[in-house]
Image (cartoon, rainbow, N blue to C red):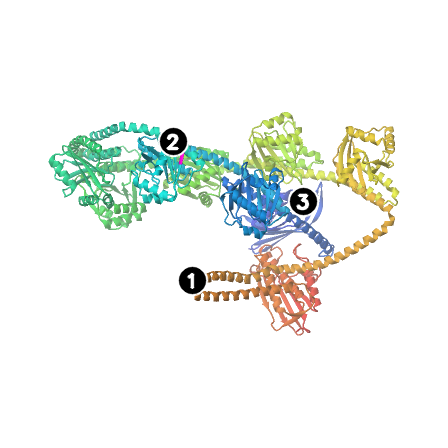
């Protein structure tokens, strides 16, 4: 790419726009021109940023410092192109606005690299710099200033390190407390309190403190409840209850519990510790015991125990230490006390949870009682008592009362048998009948009946194992109707049984289990027993009613049979009558599994039976005679004329009977046969009447009772009437069949003629199917129609699954096919080949396979699978298709058997009716298409009209409504709602406008992300302006989308809870999508219609966006004008007092812009730099409380949440607070802040408000706060306006602070001049008696600065309890000094006490009686009384109030007196005190001239010491440089040692495992295997030794190199030394910077041999050169990756590989060591300075500048030379030349 004029213009335009935003504080524009990969380095220390986000954040925080205040002059710009990059180098002089004038700041250089992406030219790198202010003219580096700054930096770093360590410790402790609090808040149940004890110990240990066991103990009135961690602290080990006297007997602990002391330390020697533990074990009630608990030997071994405990609100927490520790670390105790406070939160949560659990328990009990009560009252028969008993078992089990069974026992009249209504103990299910248990046969049962007779509430029978077996055996074997064997009962029973009986008048409630019930559980069961009283009353009533109802039930059953018989319309309904009979037997609770009618038995030798049961058996069977008991009994009864006989067959007899019987029923399935053969017996009862018989059977083999046989006979007599009706119907049916067929055809024809819409063809088709199926054709499956379409394709309508409901007509299976493409052997092909008016097509099994494949080939896989399953299950071998030709197709009926003769007639007539219908269908379809298009156009026009009227975003709902209504009118009957989505790509959200008649209008905001369906939708819609998104949601995906929409505030749509799938159909329109959600699937035509609506909307939306943009621009102009007025007024401020006017203007403009204030005004809040106090600048509409109000910070949610938001860095904050929080805030503020000056009526208005919202826009020093007392808060747009005003006001407040600072500076200058005058006079003192003159100057300057000063003076402490008072005279001089006994006079005595306490200052107001007493006392001192008289004679009066401002110095104090308080005098007093301290010191110096020489000598000695310290510091600095080199090796050494250590660890672990294996082999006496393992262990030990020596060698080598130099040369392998430091330096740098990589090259001359050098010193030289080389290549690599601004020629940099090489060479009388790199090289202008001390080119903090200097000196001491050759952008080469004449 070439730098063309066009590109240059584009780039400069981007640069100018960006620069304008930078100079004017436009953060959004500034950020928009930065690339995502942007990097930046600024001109100040805090501007080193590496990414776009951090840079923009910094600019946002500092933009106001620069905005509108900078002017660029003397500019030059250079544009250069390198590949795809454009570099701009911009030089300029920066002038900054100071008040009203621009001042020159300095020369700047902006270097920028830009690259073009899809958005245009964007900055990828920028570097701002300016000349080095440290250097003087002609210098490159300002060494002296650097040294000074380095020292300051070191001091600052040391101080900061101490601060950070302290702060870090505080954060660690707070973090631990916060984790404990967080776990407390997260407690779900009261038992979770134990987990917090474990957490406390864990956090305590993490903080570096020792603790063995950790516990918490609640002090309850009668006991202690204690939970203690396990020995390893991972879980709770002990849970126990202890008596109170366990501590009450220990005076130290008893007294502590009564005191308020937070902490107690209780050390115990061995014997005391053992006694305490023994006492705890003996007296404690343990719920849990730690297996790791220390034994007596353990306690003796550690020498005792120490308990350290901290008081909580409920008891204590504590921990133990081994041994006797009388004085544990203070910090341990402080942290334990803090933990106690945190644990109190957990305990409060524990109490709340305990209360909730108790309430929950009571609710659960009441719920269980209510369920049992309700079930009892809902009983309709006495047998339901068993179900009520089962419910009891379930409910008490839910309540934690475990049992194998439970229920009710009702005693008979003789009190011998108890009828048990209980669940089966082996299954828990209801037993079929009650179980009778004898209560007079065993001692256990006798004791139960004995206790029952006493009617004691509860009785417990506790059985041992032997008794349990005996009792359960008795119950299983001796009880009546017991369902399981003794063996099975014992298997499900606990080893030792516990029987609980709860007695009532008629019996008892029984619990059978393995645990004794607690008292709480017994109380619960007694409540259940009371509930049963109602149950039993209901039971007796039901027993009486059941006997009366039985006869009515039988008669009702007979009547139902009569009714159904008389209701028969055809003979086939006889099977329904027999089914009714079967059902009525079931309803009468007769054990029946099969029943049947034997038809015309007297005239036949076989049995012709119509039967019914609950199995899939044929309804009619004919059985020829075969030899069996039942058939023989039947023949005998028939011959004898008996009306009843019965048979009972055993298992073998039954199976023989059914084996013969099933030969005559081949269609019976295997499942039916297996069922019949599997039953244990057969009982049959049969009644024979005039010409029919009726029989019933059961497979339990239980004969029917006399009552049941009597009922059977009554049913037989009723059925005799049924059979007469049956014969009459058979005669009439034959006559009606023809009429039925004709009527069916006529119905189809009528349906066809009634068609008014083409879609009604399916109603005709359904009518056709309905009528064909209604003709009761035997073995008919369905009908099929084949149509030849106009386009030459064929359509098959399979009517098999076609059905209709009230809401919907289900379509037939439709398959489109081409005749030439299908299998030529397919039966459909044969069907089309026939031309006869009627023909039959038959499918065999091969045809079935071809048909199934045909369906799968045409996307009907499911139907094919269903059909395949049907063919397999029904064992269908053939299918018959009688067929007739249609005008344009074929029609056939699908049969499973060959067709009867009537089929041709039916088909021919039905075919003619269908031809008529299809012709009408084609005519209607053509007319409908024309009508439909007109209707669509009308609907589009309606949507277009509404869309074109779109003026605001809310109007989208109107469009959505019209769209919904028009789509509904166009036949979109399954539509759920119409949707318009408007995207906001900036926030990555969209507004979803929905409308439906059911849910009305809704607007919901959604994120682009967070839901997979929405993400898929956004991706698709954004892919194109013509994208179409369609998805069908089912199951979990549908549920997830519904939940997502509800979470985002969408109204719950009940329709979504009633469906199993939902589709979305959306078309994009550029800025969003429009479409629908649908309960069905859209057809292709519907999708086309939807797209046309999209096209109409797109045009209208474009018009809307144009209007919206215009309105937005007008609104923006209005806002910007308001902001500009505020800016102008801000810049016009000349005094700080004018800030209130700016505040008023801000409020005025916000009101004009419609931002809501309903709480009486707007607050502009300003902050203090060192605390959370604030000043509220308030503007009220009526100006009743406008002004500035100081509000000190106090603990309140409003204050706290607001400050938290500001500290977090939020730009905006809005929250609703409770009335309680609001009232607390204002009540406190009205009393303790300037808010107390508010009008009373406004205070009452605020306190009575029922709502309080606070919205605020934060800036660094100020904020705009909008309070609301009505709940109305700023909208999103209003919030943006407030934020913008907040930024502008921030500038105003900065101006305000600047003005304040200017006033302060002026006053400060005045003070400094006054102080300097005093200092000058002080330094001009030549004699001590000049003190009075100097004091007069002091007093004069004080009164000129502090004009409100009434009087001033100073006092000097004297040895005789007096103070010498010097006071200024009104004449400007000074009064004679006066002596005052300060211990006798109140004011001076008070000042003296403050001095003794070490006070720096003393400030107090004296008035009233105290002041009068003061002057009365002074008048008693003659010298003072004289001075007072002189004052009074001059016309002055003593004040009624005096404010003292005292500053102490070494010899006394300076005193300023005013009549009114003035806090400004506090600091002024201190400063003048400091100056007067100098004055008085000067005075004393002059008095003691003879001591000056001594002091001068001492000073000289001090300076000599300082010089020595400086020399030592220089040596330490050099040593620090050496240690820094060693630090470079640390990571490398770790890397070198890690490998052998890994080997040692691995082989040690393997050896340990081998030892375990060897122990196993030795135990198994496999000595050969053991020896082999031993050999493996020996080999492993050799390897461990080898790698251990290797690590040892490395450590020794490093110690050798790092030890202090002995300054003695020794033979050294230079090659090894160089190679070692190369590797260590590389790994050290890699450890600090994982991204660092470089190629290492070595070329060592092996002929060098050993060289005499000081290895430690020479190693430092080599290390320094290698480290510098790595730094150089890393810098160049960083520049290649990030910063290309410094290169003129970038060719080849893309392939740059950092390389460092070390080589040695033997010369004639010397050796040479060369360290070479391919870094940036060293510039020529600094090459001569690199060996100078403290010279460095590295950034501050990365080098001291001593490395090369020391290296140069070391090489020189070896008689060698250190040289350098370097070429810029190519690299550097350092060579060390060492002489070898004296080497070995």
State the CA–CA distance, disc 1 to disc 2: 68 Å
Q: Which residue is mark 1?
A: 1564
Q: Which residues are magenta?
A: 452-459
Mark 1 or mark 2: name the one nearer the start of the chain. 2
Mark 3 or mark 1: name the one nearer the start of the chain. 3
State the CA–CA distance, disc 3 to disc 1: 92 Å
Q: On the rendered image, what quadrant is the N terminus found in?
A: bottom right
Numbered label attached to residue 606: none
Residue 1629 is inside the magenta segment: no
Helix, strand or loop at disc 2? helix
Is residue 256 at all visible to an observer of this figure? yes
Circle 1 or circle 2, nearest the eye: 2
Mark 2 or mark 3: name the one nearer the start of the chain. 3
Q: Which residue is mark 3?
A: 70
Q: What x and y, as percent, mark residue 940? A: 41, 35
Residue 454 is inside the magenta segment: yes
Q: Nearer the viewer, residue 397 or 1579?
A: 397
Q: Residue furthest front?
A: 443
């Amino acid at each position: 790419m070439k730098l063309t004029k066009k590109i240059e213009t584009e780039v400069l335009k981007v640069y100018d726009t960006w620069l304008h935003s930078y100079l004017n504080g436009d953060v959004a524009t500034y950020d928009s021109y930065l690339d995502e990969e942007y990097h930046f380095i600024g001109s100040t220390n805090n501007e080193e940023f590496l990414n776009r986000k951090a840079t923009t954040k910094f600019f946002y925080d500092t933009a106001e410092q620069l905005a509108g205040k900078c002017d660029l002059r003397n500019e030059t710009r250079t544009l250069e192109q390198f590949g795809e990059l454009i570099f701009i180098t911009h030089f300029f002089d920066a002038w900054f606005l100071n008040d009203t004038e621009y001042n020159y700041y300095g020369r700047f250089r902006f270097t920028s690299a830009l690259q073009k992406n899809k958005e245009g030219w964007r900055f990828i790198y920028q570097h701002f710099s300016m000349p080095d202010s440290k250097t003087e003219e002609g210098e490159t580096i300002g060494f002296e200033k650097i040294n000074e700054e380095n020292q300051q930096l070191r001091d600052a770093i040391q101080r900061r390190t101490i601060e950070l360590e302290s702060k870090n410790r505080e954060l660690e402790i707070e973090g631990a407390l916060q984790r404990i609090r967080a776990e407390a808040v997260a407690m779900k149940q009261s038992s979770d309190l134990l987990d917090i004890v474990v957490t406390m110990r864990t956090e305590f240990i993490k903080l570096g403190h020792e603790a063995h066991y950790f516990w918490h103990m609640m002090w309850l009135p009668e006991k202690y409840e204690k939970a203690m961690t396990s020995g390893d602290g991972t879980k709770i080990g002990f849970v126990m209850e202890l008596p109170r006297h366990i501590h009450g007997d220990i005076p130290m602990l008893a007294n502590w519990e009564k005191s308020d002391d937070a902490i107690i330390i209780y050390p115990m020697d061995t014997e005391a510790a053992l006694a305490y533990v023994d006492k705890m074990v003996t007296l404690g009630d343990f719920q849990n015991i730690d297996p790791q608990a220390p034994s007596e030997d353990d306690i003796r071994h550690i020498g005792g125990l120490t308990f350290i405990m901290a008081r909580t609100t409920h008891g204590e927490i504590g921990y133990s230490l081994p041994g006797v520790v009388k004085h544990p670390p203070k910090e341990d105790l402080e942290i334990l006390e803090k933990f106690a406070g945190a644990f109190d939160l957990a305990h409060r949560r524990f109490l709340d949870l305990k209360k909730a659990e108790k309430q929950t328990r009571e609710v659960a009990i009441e719920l269980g009682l209510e369920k049992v009560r309700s079930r009892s009252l809902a009983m309709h028969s006495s047998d339901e008592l068993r179900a009520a008993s089962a419910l009891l078992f379930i409910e008490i089990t839910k309540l934690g009362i475990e049992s194998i069974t439970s229920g009710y026992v009702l005693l008979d009249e003789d009190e011998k048998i108890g009828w048990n209504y209980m669940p089966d103990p082996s299954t828990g299910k209801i037993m079929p009948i009650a179980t009778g248990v004898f209560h007079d046969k065993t001692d256990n049962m006798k004791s139960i009946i004995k206790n029952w007779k006493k009617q004691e509430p509860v009785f417990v029978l506790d059985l041992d194992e032997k008794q349990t077996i005996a009792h359960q055996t008795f119950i299983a074997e001796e009880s009546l109707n017991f369902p399981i064997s003794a063996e099975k009962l014992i298997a499900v029973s606990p080893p030792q049984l516990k029987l609980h009986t709860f007695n009532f008048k008629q019996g008892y409630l029984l619990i059978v289990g393995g645990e004794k019930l607690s008292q709480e559980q017994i109380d619960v069961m007694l409540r259940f027993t009371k509930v049963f009283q109602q149950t039993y009353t209901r039971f007796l009533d039901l027993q009486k009613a059941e006997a009366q109802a039985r006869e009515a039930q039988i008669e009702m059953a007979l009547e139902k049979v009569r009714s159904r018989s008389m209701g028969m319309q055809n003979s086939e309904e006889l099977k329904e009558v027999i089914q009714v009979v079967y059902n009525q037997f079931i309803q009468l609770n007769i054990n029946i599994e099969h029943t049947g009618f034997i038809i015309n038995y007297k005239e036949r030798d076989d049995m012709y039976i119509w039967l019914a049961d609950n199995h899939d058996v044929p309804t009619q069977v004919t059985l020829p005679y075969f030899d069996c008991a039942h058939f023989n009994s039947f023949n005998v009864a028939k011959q004898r004329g008996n009306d009843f006989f019965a048979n009972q067959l055993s298992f073998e007899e039954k199976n023989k009977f059914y084996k013969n019987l099933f030969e005559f029923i081949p269609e019976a399935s295997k499942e039916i046969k297996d069922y019949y053969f599997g039953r244990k017996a057969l009982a049959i009862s049969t009644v024979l009447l005039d010409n029919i018989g009726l029989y019933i059977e059961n497979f339990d083999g239980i004969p029917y009772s006399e009552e049941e046989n009597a009922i059977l006979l009554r049913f037989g007599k009723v059925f005799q009437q049924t059979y007469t009706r049956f014969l009459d119907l058979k005669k009439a049916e034959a006559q009606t069949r023809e009429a039925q067929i004709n009527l069916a055809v006529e119905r189809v024809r009528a349906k066809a003629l009634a068609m008014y819409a083409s879609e009604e063809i399916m109603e005709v088709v359904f009518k056709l199917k309905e009528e064909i199926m209604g003709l009761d054709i035997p073995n008919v499956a369905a009908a099929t129609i084949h149509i030849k379409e106009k386009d030459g394709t064929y359509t098959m309508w399979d009517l098999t699954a076609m059905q209709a409901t009230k809401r919907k007509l289900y379509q037939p299976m439709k398959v489109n096919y081409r005749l030439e493409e299908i299998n030529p052997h397919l039966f459909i092909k044969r069907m089309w080949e026939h031309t006869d008016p009627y023909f039959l097509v038959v499918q065999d099994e091969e045809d079935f396979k071809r048909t199934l494949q045909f369906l799968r080939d045409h996307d009907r896989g499911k139907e094919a699978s269903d059909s395949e399953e049907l063919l397999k299950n029904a064992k269908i071998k053939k299918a018959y298709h009688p067929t007739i030709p249609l005008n344009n197709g074929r029609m056939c009926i699908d049969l499973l058997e060959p067709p009867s003769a009537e089929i041709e007639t039916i088909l021919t007539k039905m075919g003619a009716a269908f031809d008529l219908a299809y012709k009408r269908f084609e005519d209607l379809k053509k007319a409908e298409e024309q009508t439909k298009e007109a209707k669509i156009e009308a609907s589009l026009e309606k949507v277009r009209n509404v869309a074109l009227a779109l003026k605001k975003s809310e109007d989208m709902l109107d469009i959505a409504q019209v769209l919904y209504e028009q789509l509904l009118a166009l036949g979109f009957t399954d539509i759920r709602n119409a949707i318009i989505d408007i995207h906001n790509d900036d926030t990555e959200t969209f507004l979803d406008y929905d409308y439906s008649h059911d849910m009305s209008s809704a607007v919901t905001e959604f994120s682009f992300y967070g839901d997979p369906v929405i993400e898929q939708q956004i991706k698709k819609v954004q892919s194109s302006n013509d994208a179409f998104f369609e998805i069908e949601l089912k199951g979990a995906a549908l549920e997830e989308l519904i939940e997502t929409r509800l979470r985002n505030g969408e109204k719950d749509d009940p329709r979504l809870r009633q469906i199993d799938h939902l589709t979305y159909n959306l078309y994009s329109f550029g800025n969003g999508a429009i479409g629908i959600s649908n309960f069905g699937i859209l057809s292709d035509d519907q999708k086309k219609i939807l797209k046309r609506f999209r096209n109409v909307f797109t045009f209208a939306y474009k018009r809307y966006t144009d209007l919206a943009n215009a309105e937005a621009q007008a609104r923006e102009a209005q806002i910007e004008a308001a902001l500009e007025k505020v800016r102008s007024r801000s810049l016009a401020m000349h005094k700080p007092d004018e800030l209130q006017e700016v505040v008023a203007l801000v409020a005025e403009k916000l009101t004009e812009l419609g931002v809501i204030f309903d709480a009486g005004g707007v607050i502009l809040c300003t902050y203090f730099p060192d605390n959370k106090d604030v000043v509220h600048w308030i503007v009220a509409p009526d100006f009743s409380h406008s002004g500035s109000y100081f509000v000190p910070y106090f603990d309140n949610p409003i204050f706290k949440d607001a400050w938290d938001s500001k500290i977090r860095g939020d730009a905006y904050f809005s929250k609703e607070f409770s009335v309680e929080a609001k009232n607390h805030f204002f009540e406190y503020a009205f009393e303790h802040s300037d808010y107390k000056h508010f009008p009373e009526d406004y205070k009452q208005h605020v306190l009575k408000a029922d709502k309080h919202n606070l919205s605020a826009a934060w800036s660094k020093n100020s904020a705009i706060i909008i309070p609301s007392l009505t709940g109305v808060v700023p909208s999103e747009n209003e919030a943006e306006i407030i934020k913008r005003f907040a930024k502008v006001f921030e500038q105003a407040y900065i101006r305000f602070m600047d003005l304040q600072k200017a006033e302060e500076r002026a006053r400060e200058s005045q003070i400094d001049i006054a102080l300097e005058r005093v200092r000058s006079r002080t330094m001009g003192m030549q004699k001590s008696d000049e003190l009075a003159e100097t004091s007069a100057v002091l007093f004069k300057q004080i009164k000129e600065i502090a004009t409100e000063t009434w009087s001033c003076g100073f006092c000097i402490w004297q040895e005789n309890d007096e103070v010498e008072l010097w006071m200024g005279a009104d004449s400007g001089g000074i009064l004679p000094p006066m002596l005052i006994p300060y211990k006798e006079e109140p004011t001076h005595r008070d000042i003296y006490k403050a001095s003794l306490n070490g006070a720096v200052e003393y400030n107090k107001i004296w008035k009233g009686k105290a002041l009068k007493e003061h002057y009365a006392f002074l008048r008693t001192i003659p010298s003072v009384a004289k001075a007072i008289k002189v004052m009074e004679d001059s016309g002055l009066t003593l004040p009624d109030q005096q404010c003292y401002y005292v500053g102490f110095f070494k010899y006394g104090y300076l005193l300023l007196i005013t009549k009114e308080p003035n806090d400004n005098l506090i600091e002024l007093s201190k400063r003048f005190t400091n100056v007067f301290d100098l004055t008085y010191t000067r005075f004393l110096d002059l008095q003691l001239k003879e001591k000056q020489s001594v002091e001068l000598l001492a000073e000289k000695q001090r300076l000599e010491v300082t010089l020595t310290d400086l020399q030592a510091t220089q040596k330490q600095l050099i040593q620090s440089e050496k240690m820094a080199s060693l630090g470079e090796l640390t990571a490398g050494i770790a890397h070198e040692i890690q490998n052998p250590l890994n080997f040692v660890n691995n082989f040690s672990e393997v050896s340990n495992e081998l030892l375990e294996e060897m122990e196993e082999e030795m135990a198994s006496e496999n000595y050969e295997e053991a020896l082999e393992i031993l050999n493996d262990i020996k080999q492993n030990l050799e390897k461990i030794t080898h790698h251990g020596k290797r690590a040892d060698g490395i450590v020794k080598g490093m110690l050798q190199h790092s030890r202090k130099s002995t300054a003695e040369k020794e033979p050294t392998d230079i090659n090894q030394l160089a190679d070692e430091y190369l590797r260590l330096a590389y790994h050290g740098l890699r450890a600090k910077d994982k991204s660092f990589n470089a190629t290492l090259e070595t070329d060592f001359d092996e002929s060098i041999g050993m060289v005499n050098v000081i290895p430690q010193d020479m190693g430092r030289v080599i290390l320094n050169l290698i480290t510098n080389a790595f730094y150089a290549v890393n810098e160049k690599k960083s520049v290649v990756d990030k910063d290309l601004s410094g290169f003129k020629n970038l060719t080849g940099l893309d392939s740059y590989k950092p390389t460092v090489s070390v080589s040695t060479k033997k010369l004639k009388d010397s050796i040479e060591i060369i360290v070479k790199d391919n870094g940036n090289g060293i510039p020529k202008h600094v090459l001569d300075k690199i060996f100078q001390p403290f010279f460095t080119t590295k950034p501050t903090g990365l080098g001291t500048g001593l490395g090369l200097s020391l290296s140069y000196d070391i090489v020189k001491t070896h008689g060698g030379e250190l040289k350098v050759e370097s070429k810029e952008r190519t690299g550097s080469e350092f060579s060390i030349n060492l002489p070898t004449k004296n080497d070995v």
